[in-house]
Image (cartoon, helix red, strand yellow):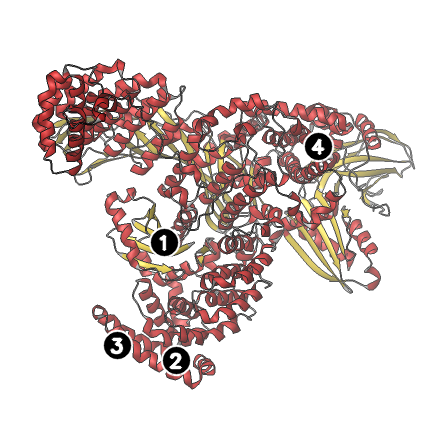
Amino acid sequence: MSNSLSYNDQGGPDTAVEVGQETTQTSPAAGAFGLFSTDFKKNDDLKEMLESNKESVKLEAMKRIVELIAKGKNVPELFPSVVKNVASKNIELKKLVYVYLVRYAEEQQDLALLSISTFQRALKDSNQLIRASALRVLSSIRVPIIVPIMMLAIQEAATDLSPYVRKTAAHAIQKLYSLDPEKKEQLIDIIEKLLKDKSTLVAGSVVMAFEEVCPDRIDLIHKNFRKLCGLLVDVEEWGQVVIMNMLTRYARTQFTSPWKEGALFDGNNAQAFYDSEEERKENSSSEHVYVMDPDHRLLLRSTKQLLQSRNTAVVMSVAQLYWHLAPKHEVSIVSKSLVRLLRSHREVQYIVLQNIATMSIQRKGMFEPFMKSFYVRSTDATHIKTLKLEILTNMANEANISTILREFQTYVKSQDKVFAAATVQAIGRCATNITDVADTCLNGLVLLLSNRDETVVAESVVVIKKLLQTQPTQHSDIIKHMAKLFDNITVPMARASIIWLIGEYCEHVPKIAPDVLRKMAKTFTSEEDIVKLQTVNLAAKLYLTNAKQTKLLTQYILNLGKYDQNYDIRDRTRFIRQLIVPNEKSGPLAKYARRILLAPKPAPVLESAFKERDRFQLGTLSHTLNTKAVGYLQLSDWPAVAPDQSVRNVEVAEIKESTVPSLEKKRSSKAKKFYSDSEEEEEDGGSQGNSSDDSKSSGSSEASTSGSESEEEEETSSQSGSGSSEEESEQSSDRSNSDSRKKKKKTLERKKKPKKESSGSDSDEEKDHGKGDASSEDSSSSSSDEYTSDSESDSGVPPEKSSKPKAKVVPETKKEITLLDLDDFAPEPAVSTKSSVISPSLLSDLDGLSLSSTPSAIQVSPLDFVPVSHELLHRMTGKGLAAKYHYPRQPCIYGNSMVAVQLSLTNSSERTLEDLHFGERSGQNIHGFTSIESLEPGASVSVSMGIDFKDSTQAANFQLCTKDDQFSVSITPAVGELLLPVTMMEQDFVKEQGKLLGMNETSATITVTPENASTDSVSRKVVTVANLGMVPSDQDTVLRFAAKLASSGVLVLVSVELNTSTAQLRINTEKTVIGSMLLRDLKTALA
Amino acid sequence: MIHSLFLINSAGDIFLEKHWKSVVGRSVCDYFFEAQEKAGEPENVPPVISTPHHYLINIFRDRIFFVSVIQTEVPPLFVIEFLHRVAETFQDYFGECSESTIKDNVVIVYELLEEMLDNGFPLATESNILKELIKPPTILRSMVNTITGSSNVGATLPTGQLSTIPWRRAGVKYTNNEAYFDAIEEIDAIIDKSGSTVCAEIQGVIDACVKLTGMPDLTLSFMNPRLLDDVSFHPCVRFKRWESERVLSFIPPDGSFRLMSYHVSAQNLVAIPIYVKQNISFFESGSSGRLDITLGPKQTMGKQVEGLTVTMHMPKVLLSVNLTATQGTHKFDPVTKVLVWDIGKLNPQKLPNLKGSLSVQSGAPKPEENPTLNIDFKIQQLAISGLKVSRLDMYGEKYKPFKGVKYITKAGRFQVRT
């Protein structure tokens, strides 16, 4: 009932009349569907059902209506009855009404207006899904009158709190634009606003709107460029494709060409591509140095990992982005992923192969390692087969031609004759491109002339004809052979080709030629037009060279041609006759007949059909169709001089850069910023690797290698394969310097271990910056070696590591067959680390040394922090030995992943305790202290030890032993002690925090007493609870702390936002367990 | 982007149409039918067809053509990938993607399509999100719905849509917590006449079925991750961890999903589990030929080869066969000219053999090429590349899940040229 009420509310009596009119109008129209008279009847009862009071009946009716729409049946006459239900409470009913409404609103505009107010109301609903779907439907109703309403709705939705609604608004922009293009300016304003949106949900849709409404407004992108690059990985797949395509276009207008000067030429000149490799080597020294814009590099870096996407469209997008933007030597990283896509559906294969075909023309080498992936299978569809053939042909060079030809031999015999014929052509192309095999190919083709299939033979003849033109003299026997075959060949094109060949080279086959002409004269009338034309040609040529034998024959043929049905032939005959037969009327041309007809003709070039395709952006519809599709946006050429790059600076990022004066410096500092961030992450990853590794022994040293590896990879990518040019090494050294600064903490720790000092190539760097240069060059040169020998420059460590557990497991896998419980694989309890071998005294020496020589990079907690001691062993239970422990909150000297624990042992008994030492330990990896020979009564000593808690609050159990007693003790860490503080800039903090949203975030609001509300007291309390590093901030009310977990290196970010009486506590970390535990501790501390 | 979608069955009937922008008439499909006629086989229909005003991008799947109408430039793979995603969603919802299931559930199909695209741009394609919006049909639910009048359509925005992990919904609960992983490897190979390998490679996938309560954070590590040359992941996998540590760290979607697919590096030699001895010949004179095929185990790593099937597309001139098999059954379809020999388990002691004569249409020339043998087989409990999962750890939740890994090796596109 509520529905009809609301309906009356808006409509009033006028509309009711209108409704009535509408129904009377439509019913005869519906009746006109003679064929659907039964449907019409059905529709009648539908109308009653829709008017019913029962929701379920209405729903049933709507379902039937949607079924009709789906089948393509037209049911506009129900519009009035349906539209009444637009405000229904039943969501499913409502949705189905929406479906109907969107489908027919355009036809029944007046009635559609009745529903508008419902949507306007729904736009204010508290449920975001309802707001969004109201906007979706409202904007889908293609009724021009409501454009202003739509405009308002979009403007409002663009500032909605829910990103989902904002996403819908972005879609609505496109709909409104197609309805009323004149609103463009207003819409661009909204797009500009939405482009600033930080939500990954919105990014893809708004870029789509941008592409559709104002693709030329590149200036809107500048400020958002870096943000988009950053967000890209987290945007949903479809958005990624759109954003990458847009950024490709953007980059081509904003950055200078990364292709070296020597390689800067028009893309069609294929030859230059092949030479470019060598050329570049020669030229590299003389060329003026090219410095890649850091933003350009950022784009390439942030798209690279998307090559691993499961979505084929995303992979293709990355591939085209690299193809159009990356330096030539970097493009090849995409080939592996593209080849992977060939395992996908047939349609995907088709598109990918097309793009590979275009690529392989310009860069033969790019796909050569994957040649076998392009071998044809008999089950492939024909268009897939021909594309594979195309690629194989493009790839052919002197080295692989024999393999390829062997494959082709199989293909020629294929049952699929279209494909077999295409293979013949491919062989022809190979023969012209690679002169070495021309003869082999030709012989092979001649053999094919005896093939039973006509199409194959015909194709062979045509290809042979083309080949012979390149070197006719040596091959008169082939021509003879073909002349012999002539009688058996019926395909017109092939016959014509043979006749042309004989005519062209009649001097090489003087005996056969007239004979062929004689035969042709007999069958002339029954031949195809194309053959007739060539026969006339042959006759003319023979007349000129061998008039004695062929004069009569020629005249006979010319006579036949004169009365032919086809005007082309008649015309040609007339022309030839005037040209060759001397008579009084013949003009001055006759003298030159010989030179005209028997002029040496240039050989045709056999080319790929994909040669011209590269004028289109790869991966586009236009590229697939090889014609410009509607709405195709041309990629611009690289600008000669890069436009001002500062336009992309966002205010926050500028702070750093503004202090650096010169442009060159500015660049490097920017590079620093970009690279160091991610490198630090990679670095972190490296140390994570070590913590989760089963065998601890190689763990720490591996961390350092993997760290330097990530750097090396970096370098290889920036380093052109042609060796290090100056600016690159400069850049890379800058980078390594900067990151050495950032990583000081780690290097520092490494330095403590003599063993590692030798292994980490970068460990020396921080001693002085001058040395940093040299070592980075070292690492880059070694990396380029690695790069060539093995694309994956991992060290050989992992397999060695894995071999041990593997051996252990094999018997188990045999035992349990189908389902082996993974628990079986639980690693053996960790063996004590190698580092424990080093005597702690040496360690402590080193400790002091390194700490004094370099300022600590870790801002160890504020000075006012007094470590709290905990009881470990009471003097009563310890028979006089009392032990207390506290966390000194310093980096542990025994291992990267360990937490330092300071033990203070006191002898409260009457006698001297002898030989205090560390006993059995279990579970955790614990590094004990050196034994103490004796402890006088009343004296106390403090020793340090390291425990790897593996980021859990499980207690570490071990034994304290004296000469005669053993005491089992355990240390249960507070969660705050599992952390190591991290220094971080505010913007980095915000950035990292942005990555750790959703379920990685835990938060709570707590009330704080006014005396506790000061920032000082809060920060003191927070720092007391947990070992966190303070992040300097210019905001007074927000306190930020950062730390990482000692064992895994996972970041833990804490922020406290102070209001008058409450504090909002947020913890962002990947380890949600730690996060929630920390939250609990902090809550109790602050409340 | 995507303007309209038409579903066409193999008989050429349009049985469903959906428009996301203004309505495009059915007549646009005529261009498609034209191309279809020209192509003959449904597989040969070009995926992209250009018409005067529109572009048609189609996929052929489960004997249905999904024909989408495009008006402006769009990456074709974008559309193709999306159409396949649509088909997969149908399969997910209705068990299979066929004309009859789509027709039976046309309302749900319509609701799904409505949610998946907005104005032709994908809106929600994650099956988890869709399932919260529109519940898949079950007999029980449809009964409950008719009684209580409740609906299949969710009233609130799925939580996944807004979070950074759209693939998982919140509040998942199971009484039995289990996580199963299937490592399935396929051998793609071409074996030439003489039995030597022309090319062979291993492609693998890890399919997972994870039914775990809450928000588990899983880490899957391999014994020998360096085997994996090229990988692609479900979006849930943290790429950084893979790059640095070669472990798969992820918060899994709820239910079945493909965790990763990989390609085993080309340097590793591929073990070919079976060999084929074949002799097929057609006599020059007289319209007949002979066929003799024997299969045997080669490098099976001591495992049983099962589900062995040989499929041959015989030349068009072949009329009938007269064959005897020592094991399994064989069938020749005289219309499609496909010979299928279903062997079953391979017994190393008694090798299966198929032998007999072929009769060819009289007067027809001897076929040029012998038919290719497409071989299908399966080996349980073996990953032919040697890949091994070493452990699975769960963080973030307290309970202990039941975990399991299963290995299967299959023939992919395994062809023997003759």
Q: Which residue is mark 2?
A: A53
Q: Are marks 4 and 1 in contact (CB under 8 Å)?
A: no
At numbered mark 3, what does the secondary structure look like: helix, strand or loop?
A: helix
At numbered mark 1, what does the secondary structure look like: helix, strand or loop?
A: strand
Residues marked 4 and 3, same chain: yes
Residues marked 1 and 2, same chain: no
Q: Is residue A156 above or below residue A773?
A: below
**Measured Cα–Cα span from mark 4 to mark 1:** 52 Å
Q: Which residue is mark 3?
A: A28
Residues marked 3 and 1, same chain: no
Q: Which residue is mark 1?
A: B69
Q: Position of residue A1021 (x, y in %)?
A: 80, 53
Mark 1 or mark 2, which is nearer to you? 1
Q: Are marks 2 and 3 in contact (CB under 8 Å)?
A: no
**Measured Cα–Cα span from mark 1 to mark 2:** 40 Å
Work out which quarter of the rendered image holds the C terminus of chain B and state it. Answer: top left
Amino acid type of disc 1? Val
Residue A727 picture quarter: top right
Amino acid type of disc 2? Asn
Disc 1 sits on a residue from what chain?
Answer: B
Disc 4 sits on a residue from what chain?
Answer: A
Amino acid type of disc 4? Asp
Tell me the tag on residue A734.
4
Work out which quarter of the rendered image holds the N terminus of chain B and state it. Answer: bottom left
Q: Residues within 10 Å of mark 3 (few under 14, many from 20)?
A: few
Amino acid type of disc 3? Pro
